[in-house]
Image (tube, rainbow, N blue to C red):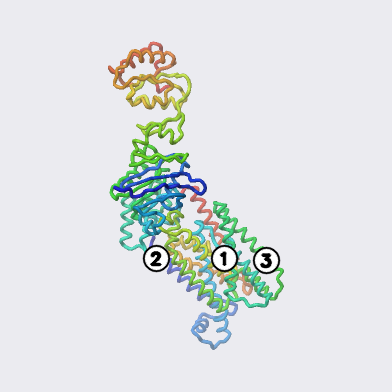
Amino acid sequence: MNGKRIGFCYGLLLLLLAVLLLWSVCTGSTAMGLAGVLRVLLGDAADKTAYGIVWNIRLPRILASVILGGALAVSGFLLQTFFANPIAGPFVLGISSGAKLTVALTMILFLQLGLVMRSAVLVLAAFIGALMAMGFILLLSRRVRNMSMLVVGGVMVGYICSAITDFAITFADDANIVNLHNWAQGSFSGTSWANVRDMAALVSVLLVLAFLLSKPIGAYQMGESYAQSLGVNVRRFRLELILLSSLLSACVTAFAGPISFVGIAVPHLVKGMMKTAKPLVVMPACFLGGAVFCLFCDLLARTLFAPTELNISSVTAVFGAPVVIALMVSRKNRRFQGV
Amino acid sequence: MEPYLYTARLAVGYGGKPLIENLCLHVRRGEIMTLIGPNGAGKSTILKTLARQLEPMAGTVYLDKQALGQMAEKELAQRLAIVTTERIDPELMSCRDLVSTGRYPYTGRLGLLRAENRAIVENALAQVHAGELAELPFAQVSDGQRQRVLLARALCQQPDVILLDEPTSFLDIHHKLELLDILKTLVRQQQLAVVMSLHELDLAQRVSDTVVCVEKSGALRMGAPEQIFTEENIRALYGLTEESYNPLFGCAELPPVQGEAQIFVIGGGGSGIPVYRRLQRLGIPFAAGILHRNDLDYPVARTLAAELVEEAAYQPVTAETLARALAVLERCGKAVCTLPAFGPLNEANRLLWETAGRSGKQTDWNTI
């Protein structure tokens, strides 16, 4: 492990994050110069419109993509540890879609009953959906030992959940269905400060818990029997991993809908950059990497064809999927070389 | 000295009927116990139970008089380390990183290594002669190096007991010997108690203080190598019927070729063995003689030759034996002599060879 290299990577990630933050806050349908934005950020409320746009529209959205992007990357890292498979992630295993399904159903139910959805209800619904999808994947993983088959199974689960969601959305009749439709495609738009506060509280607690698991995660990277012989309570540890990763991806799905490939691409890129897989250094970097990745993709999503917005998942897929393919090819080569 | 690791009426297996019952093993510190036996008999199952990775189906494992089941995870990890057969493929881990995971039971909440931990890691690497591998990615080192690194990882736990499951499988002979040599030295120096499973009977015979035969039927036999490595014992253990096992050489032979002897091999002093093996490979039944029972060729000839003319140890060859040999030679189409010289005690072999010459049966064995 190379301390200098790791330091450099952290520096680079923080720099990228800072640059993207500034860039994002300055970019949008209403043109505002950097100076104008900075003035508003420092509390100058003279220009009411500018103040409103920056503080009530752009900032919450930007913070959401930072928090949720990071959460997604960490969730992916935990799942990869759990399945000892670099292609595992909340999206490909169908966990995001499971969460999407229950959230959509809950939303429709609440809209029909005329109730207001609170963040807690959203997250709870997403968590239940995520756990159901996860449960199915776990059952499947007992039957199929082959990791690629497991991923195929996960993708199928994802399709089934998405199909049911689409079905429900198509037949639910309500004016709010437009929002629901946007959400179901994955988007950071329309995030409120209340949302940001809730997700920040939840994600930070989960991240601290995940970080505290970095020691057993490191042991688990060598396989179950070595982990156990080092004193890891494997059963409890596996449960903790499942709950944490499901909660993290449920949280993301609840607030921003399903977002693809971040969970696989970011941990892989971070590990490659740092040349280590040590959870203690990789996990915080995954968070930063996920934040940078999502911030960048969201920036593209809302500027590329402005004023039309792309859904975030399409953009992350464009950048994330090639990484996954490269990963599979390189793994395959290693197998052929008998390593 | 008291046994350090022992089991009391232990039964092991995976649910249902136990694979092995009433297992009473005991290992002292500074000793190596080796489990031998056919595949699937339960060697790995025993090791897993000793490592507490598998619940015993009955009975108890004791480690330093404490029941294994009641020890805290951390305490067990500080006393017992394992080297498994599982092919591990940790991502982006150097050999040093891998070895340092052995410090797990001694580090704090986040697993940070202090200076004294680092020193222990370096020391463990040095003990298995793997210092030069420290920086290399674990995924890229050879099988022999891997096993040494995994052993260093186990040492890093500063255990009293190390369990190794087939540590020498996949290694070439040089690396097999190197690994066992390192292990033997460590056991002596650090007074470790070692339990391992081995497939190589010759190596098991050399390094073990105690050998346990684990039979398919669940039967067990335990003893010193000289008690265990007898021909009938090994044949029974592995279910050898036509094949044979030579306890002196510690090696097994393929079944002999059936049929009438076609070639008479006059051998002695070890010179005949390569020819016996060659004829065996070519599928040609042969006769061997005249061999004294204490001759180096004798045990191999006894298991491979279709016919064997033998003489009691340290006795001159009698006329009857010679007559018997001549009769066998009569029936063989060819004769081969591997002896570099004749002397007073095998004068009979010279006569035999001359007889073969007169009847035109003398053959150069390289031409066979």
**Element on which disc 3 rests:** helix
Which label was assigned to residue A166? 3
Q: Horizontal placement of A91 versus B270: left or right?
A: right
- What amino acid type is highlighted by mark number 1? Thr
Mark 2 Cα-neighbour bin, 10 Å: few <14, some 14–19, many ≥20: few
Vertical relation: B214 (above or below) A91: above
Vertical relation: B272 (above or below) B209: above
Task: Residue B221 in the image: state x and y as whole percent.
Answer: 40, 39
Task: Residue B203 in the image: state x and y as whole percent.
Answer: 36, 39
**Element on which disc 1 rests:** helix
- What amino acid type is highlighted by mark number 3? Asp
Same subunit, tags 2 and 3: no
In the rendered structure, the residue with mark 2 lies on which chain? B
CA distance for labels 1 and 3: 21 Å
Check disc 1 and report the residue beneath it: A316
Do the numbered discs 2 and 1 sit on residues whose CB atoms are within 8 Å? Answer: no
Mark 1 Cα-neighbour bin, 10 Å: few <14, some 14–19, many ≥20: many
Task: Residue A64 in the image: state x and y as whole percent.
Answer: 54, 74
Vertical relation: A204 (above or below) A269: below
Nearest-to-viewer mark from 1 and 3: 3
Q: Residue at x 46, y 69 (%)?
A: A208
CA distance for labels 2 and 3: 45 Å
Nearest-to-viewer mark from 2 and 1: 2
Check disc 2 and report the residue beneath it: B109
Q: Residue at x 65, y 77 (%)?
A: A115
- What amino acid type is highlighted by mark number 2? Arg
Q: Nearer the viewer, residue B17 or B260?
A: B17
**Residue A196 visible to the viewer:** yes
